[in-house]
Amino acid sequence: MKAILYEKLKEYAQSNQYPFHMPGHKGGREGIFPEVAQMDITEIDGFDNLHQPEGILAKAQELCAKTFGAEQSYFLINGSTAGILAAILGSCGDGEKILLARNCHKSVYSAVILSGAKAEYILPEYFTEMDFYGGVTVESCEKALSLHPDAKALVITSPSYEGFTSDIANIAEVVHKKGTILIVDEAHGSHMKFHPYFPKTALEQGADIVIQSLHKTLPSFTQTAVMHIQGDTVDRTRLQQALSMVQSTSPSYLFLASIDSCRSWLDGQEGKEAFDKYVRQLQEFRSTMAGNQSILLLGKEVCATHGVADMDLGKLIFYIPQGQVTGVELGKLLRQRFGLQMELCGNTHIIAMTSPADDEEGFLRLQQAILHLEKEISEIPISTIDFSEKMRQDIPVAKYTPRQGYFAPKKEVSLEESIGNICGEFVIPYPPGAPLLVPGEVISEKMVKKMQACRKKGICLIGCEDSSSQKIRIISL
Ligand SMILES: Cc1ncc(COP(=O)(O)O)c(C=O)c1O
């Protein structure tokens, strides 16, 4: 099926209609990007309303649901963030319990603050030696559900930033036994359904609400995402109302058309061929990395350990086992000497994110750069990794809910002075975006050390007012 929204926009741009309507650039008559602006409209006559779709948008969303294997799909023009906010606002109210994997993205925590839900955490498994989270086990979900049988929803990120999926099929089974809603943040997995090389999707495994950022791993504009629904555990009216609260009343038709065009591309021959080529390129690339000793490319050997059910092999995780350089330093070398920008540069690893739009030149440049640095780095002395600087942590003690902590009066103190006090803001290494501290949690000495280590290594901490991470806001009740 063709890209119906794009066709309609093109037709409108070529028509002789004079725009006595928003936006103020008036079809690109003033301002920048005039060619693009010609098609930049919002809900005008003849087009459909995103908040009450009855015509072309209803049709486009229906086509989207079919392509992605959902019962119902919603277009998101504020990224997966909007879908996550709506999913949680649509499932949990003030004071109701929600179970969250601790490595959830900051948008999940924002939703908890907005809804007033009481968060209880599930700690995902951790690759201590590599310093990142693995998956969430079925047992840990079962345990959390037995401690909190009244939880309204359980939220998991799968695949994780690193591309690790959890065993969603079995998690869905235990979650559904309690009548709880399973929300899967699949922001990084919108491509997975379209080739067997990739893990099974959360929809295929029985999740109730699944949110995907098309812009992350498919050819679609930044900010475009989709939320999919299936089953009867979700109150769809409430979900739709929540979505209406968090999405703009002036949605960009460029974004909406981008989602529909991406769907049309996936349905057509072009998409299928692109996926075949993408998988071939990944396989070839991976085979050239097989002999590395200093910069290891992680693959399926990590599966069935640390809660990892499967791995998205489109995520290229390079791990430096002997610590000759940090991930941040390796990322800098790739950027400055080879003109290659990584998605994430962490403590002991970097992540190169790929998509079916990557070309041969990109893969070749990355291959040559890594093989060159592999040789260079092997000559640097091995360094002992300081385990105190790892990101793994036990879940801090919470004195207040995230919402109470967020709204409480605060004062700024030095990191050293903050020990033993209650945190008044988020402390989130970004990327990947999983918080070290949430408002309302007690600040331990260990946590302060981790923050200082992040600062030393150049890992960006967001959520805190002092971006240099010398100070922190504590609750001053
Ligand atoms: C795991 C995860 N979930 C959700 C989001 C939010 O997605 P978006 O940027 O599309 O709003 C991100 C963004 O990086 C993410 O990594």
Image (cartoon, grey):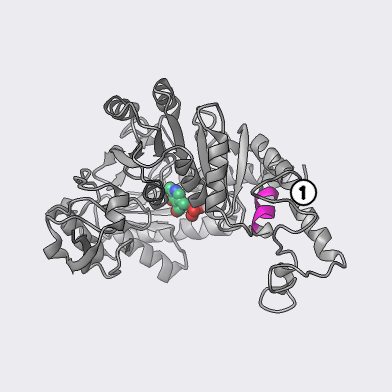
Picture coordinates of residue 416, whole percent (x, y): 12, 64
Are there few (<14), some (14-19), or many (20+) residues within 10 Å of tag 1?
Answer: some
Q: Is residue 366 visible?
A: yes
- Which residue position is annotated with label 1? 4
**Camera-nearest residue between 94 and 263:** 94
In terms of secondary structure, where does tag 1 sit?
A: helix
Q: Residue furthest bottom?
A: 30
Picture coordinates of residue 19, whole percent (x, y): 78, 69
- 411 sits to left or right of 9: left
Picture coordinates of residue 232, whole percent (x, y): 54, 26
Residue at 69 percent of width and 69 percent of height = 23
Q: Amino acid at mark 1?
A: Ile
Residue at 62 percent of width and 31 percent of height = 71
Magenta region, main secondary structure: helix
> In the image, which residues are magenta?
255-260
Residue at 36 percent of width and 31 percent of height = 151
Picture coordinates of residue 412, whole percent (x, y): 21, 68
**Camera-nearest residue between 408 and 456:** 408
How many numbered circles does the render carry?
Answer: 1
